[in-house]
Image: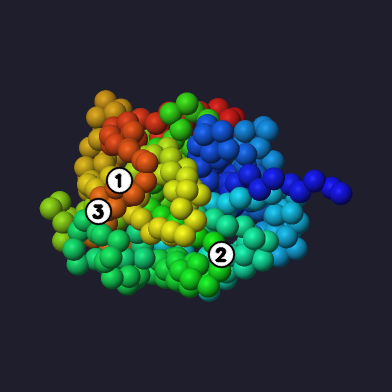
């Protein structure tokens, strides 16, 4: 009789991307076995440790998923694969419902069929839309103002309904603004299209662009620019490992948690901090608002601090910016 494959591997979808690759590093640092599924449409194989298996393919390919689950003994899924650009979701909503909602449904069904007991979902603060009360608690109304947020909200609902009917549990982690890079220089934000402020500022700091744009200066905030809760990507990755441990330790419990620091910075404040790190001022240019951007998104994070064995280690905007710039300099060498 052939021996059954131990169920001890974590499948990371989108694991060659920005957040996914940091989750892979955090899992490996915690001693976990990992396999990555990524179509490499926005991720990079070189972002992964050499000994982590990479399966190139689509998370909506049911035959591929069945074979992967069977071959690797998957204990849990960390699901990062999907489309993430708010402004693109406004222009191409059906793309987002396909890549985020429909593909997640297929992955979830395949996981349940294969008996995978744990699922950790990459959700977003965009599910809250334009909240009336900030900082935002998890019980705040879900009212997304763009298809990106709506596609994630629908997946959260699928997870909740499925967990009520099937023998598995899940964690939906609602990220706020993720930035920075692995302090050891092993990975960072490497996408060819930069849309997030700190990544754009890091590109300007290393000469890739000649200015930084401020999209809107008439928001109802103290200085007129958007406020965001910026979390270091390594702290976010650590939260995923802590969520995994929590799901395994209590299989009857599912979790929906904000992942943020509980305080925010405006666009101008972030750029001031960039100038502090650099020792000179970047060229700033103002422009109109972008579609789908709420004025302020700041996490209430009491729930995650009370629920998971997790404490932020990199809660310093200057540290986040310095790590992002260091990675951008390294990325320029990698691509030379």
The percent coordinates of residue 311 (x first, y second) are 33, 38
Rendered residue at 33%/33% (across/down): 313
Q: Earlier in the sequence, mark 2 or mark 1?
A: 2
Can residue 234 be spotted in the picture? yes
In the rendered image, the residue lying farthest to the front is 1
Dot 1 crowding, Cα within 10 Å, few <14, some 14–19, many 20+: some
Tell me where residue 141 sits by quadrant. bottom left
Between 97 and 26, the residue placed more toward the observer is 26
Dot 3 crowding, Cα within 10 Å, few <14, some 14–19, many 20+: many
Instruction: Give the alpha-carbon distance from disc 2 to disc 3, as whole Å.
Output: 30 Å
Circle 1 SS class? helix
The percent coordinates of residue 69 (x first, y second) are 70, 54
Residue 2, placed above or below residue 106 = above
Label 1 close to label 3 by CB (< 8 Å): no
In the rendered image, the residue lying farthest to the right is 1
The percent coordinates of residue 287 (x first, y second) are 29, 56
Instruction: Give the alpha-carbon distance from disc 1 to disc 3, as whole Å.
Output: 10 Å
Say left or right for 262 vs 156: left
Q: Mark 2 or mark 1: which is in front?
A: 2
Say left or right for 173 vs 5: left
- Residue 167: which disc? 2
Rendered residue at 26%/66% (across/down): 140
The percent coordinates of residue 167 (x first, y second) are 56, 64
Q: Which residue is mark 1?
A: 305
- Residue 320: which disc? none
Q: Mark 2 or mark 3: which is in front?
A: 2
Q: Which residue is mark 3?
A: 300
Residue 154, placed above or below residue 312 = below
Circle 2 SS class? loop
Image colouring: rainbow
Residue 73, placed above or below residue 82 = above
């Amino acid at each position: 009789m052939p021996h059954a494959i131990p169920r001890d591997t974590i499948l990371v979808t989108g694991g060659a991307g920005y957040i996914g690759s940091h989750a892979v590093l955090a899992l490996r640092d915690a001693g976990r076995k990992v396999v990555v599924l990524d179509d490499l449409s926005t991720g990079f194989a070189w972002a992964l440790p050499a000994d982590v298996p990479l399966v190139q393919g689509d998370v909506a390919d049911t035959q591929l998923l069945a074979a992967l689950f069977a071959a690797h003994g998957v204990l849990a899924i960390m699901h990062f694969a999907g489309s993430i650009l708010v402004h693109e979701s406004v222009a191409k909503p059906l793309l987002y419902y396909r890549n985020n909602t429909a593909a997640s449904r297929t992955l979830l069904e395949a996981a349940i069929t294969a008996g995978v007991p744990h699922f950790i979902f990459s959700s977003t603060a965009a599910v809250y839309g334009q909240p009336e009360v900030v900082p935002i608690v998890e019980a705040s109304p879900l009212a997304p103002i763009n298809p990106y947020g709506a596609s994630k909200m629908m997946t959260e609902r699928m997870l909740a309904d499925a967990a009520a009917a099937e023998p598995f549990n899940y964690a939906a982690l609602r990220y706020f603004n993720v930035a920075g890079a692995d302090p050891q220089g092993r990975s960072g934000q490497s996408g060819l299209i930069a849309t997030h402020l700190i990544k754009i500022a890091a590109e300007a700091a290393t000469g890739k662009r000649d200015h930084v744009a401020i999209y809107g200066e008439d928001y109802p905030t103290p200085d007129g620019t958007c406020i965001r809760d910026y979390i270091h990507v390594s702290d976010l990755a650590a939260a995923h490992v802590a969520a995994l441990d929590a799901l395994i330790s209590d299989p009857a419990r599912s979790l929906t948690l904000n992942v943020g620091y509980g305080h925010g910075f405006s666009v101008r404040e972030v750029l001031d901090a960039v100038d502090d790190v650099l020792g000179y001022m970047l060229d700033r240019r103002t422009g109109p608002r972008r579609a789908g951007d709420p004025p302020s998104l700041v996490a209430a994070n009491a729930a995650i601090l009370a629920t998971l064995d997790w404490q932020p280690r990199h809660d310093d905007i200057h540290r986040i910016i310095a790590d992002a710039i260091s990675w951008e300099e390294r990325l320029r060498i990698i691509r030379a």
